[in-house]
């Protein structure tokens, strides 16, 4: 099922159920897409306005990047579900014999690594979206500046949510060198971009008070 093609009500209903997907990763990607769209809306409200004619070229470029990020994040909603299914199956494999134990261990390791790959990509997209919000805040229409703040906080939340879906999988990976490298990459994004998102939010809030 493509969870981005169903209604919002159905998505929330399935998310709240005992179904294994969508889960935290898919929800993170969806929230990231929403946050990106809020920044993009500010661009839409700025495009074509005479008051902002000196930044029109920049705004159109920002909107094109936001369009691409929205589509990529929505695609990752479905992709996250796809990579979780093999992991779900691997957890259910028998381990009564040594051969079964070895096969299950190998399949678990492969599935865990694949399950890490999507939330890391979600994090990367959210970082890019946060950078776009910095530009939308600086160049976008002042009447919609609150939406930049809303959007960047959504992207920050999505970034943090996706990181938890990285860490729950890396914790179980036996190849600790691989797991630690993935964790290092995630930590670097968290350190840099949660700080940047908070800074953008504070700037927006200051302009509104």
Image (spheres, grey):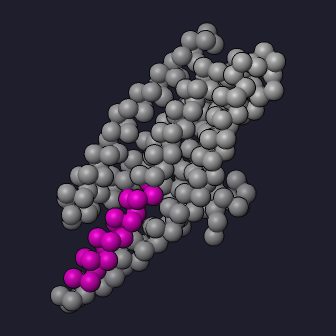
- Expressed as whole percent of the image width and height from the top left, the position of residue 184 reads 28, 45
Asked where in the image residue 176 lies, by quadrant, the reply is bottom left
Magenta segment's dominant SS is helix
196 displayed left or right of 145 = left
Q: Is residue 107 above or below residue 72?
A: below
Asked if residue 135 shows in the view, the reply is yes
- Expressed as whole percent of the image width and height from the top left, the position of residue 199 reads 47, 21
- Expressed as whole percent of the image width and height from the top left, the position of residue 65 reads 62, 41
Q: Is residue 133 above or below residue 92?
A: above
**Residue drawn at point x = 70 percent, y = 61 percent:** 5
**Residue drawn at point x = 23 percent, y = 52 percent:** 180
Q: Residue furthest top?
A: 209
Q: Is residue 56 above or below residue 160?
A: above
**Residue drawn at point x = 38 percent, y = 49 percent:** 164
Q: Quadrant of the N terminus?
A: bottom right
**Residue drawn at point x = 51 percent, y = 18 percent:** 202
Q: What are the residue bounds of the magenta stretch?
A: 102-119
Asked where in the image residue 113 lies, by quadrant, the reply is bottom left
Asked where in the image residue 84 lies, by quadrant, the reply is bottom left
Q: Quadrant of the C terminus?
A: top right
Q: Is residue 103 magenta?
A: yes
């Amino acid at each position: 099922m493509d969870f981005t093609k169903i209604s919002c009500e159905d998505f929330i209903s399935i998310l709240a159920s005992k179904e294994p997907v969508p889960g935290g990763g898919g929800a993170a990607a969806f929230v990231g897409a929403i946050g990106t769209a809020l920044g993009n809306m500010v661009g839409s409200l700025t495009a074509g306005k005479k008051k902002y004619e000196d930044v029109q070229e920049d705004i159109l470029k920002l909107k094109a990047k936001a369009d691409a990020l929205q589509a990529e994040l929505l695609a990752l909603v479905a992709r996250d579900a796809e990579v979780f299914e093999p992991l779900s199956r691997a957890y259910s494999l028998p381990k009564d014999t040594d051969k079964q134990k070895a096969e299950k261990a190998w399949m678990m390791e492969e599935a865990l690594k694949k399950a890490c790959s999507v939330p890391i990509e979600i994090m990367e997209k959210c970082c890019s979206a946060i950078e776009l919000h910095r530009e939308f805040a600086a160049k976008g229409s002042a009447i919609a500046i609150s939406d930049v703040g809303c959007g960047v906080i959504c992207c920050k939340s999505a970034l943090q949510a996706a990181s938890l879906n990285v860490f729950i999988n890396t914790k179980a990976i036996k190849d600790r060198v691989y797991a630690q490298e993935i964790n290092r990459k995630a930590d670097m994004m968290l350190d840099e971009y949660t700080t940047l998102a908070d800074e953008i939010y504070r700037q927006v809030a200051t302009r509104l008070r």
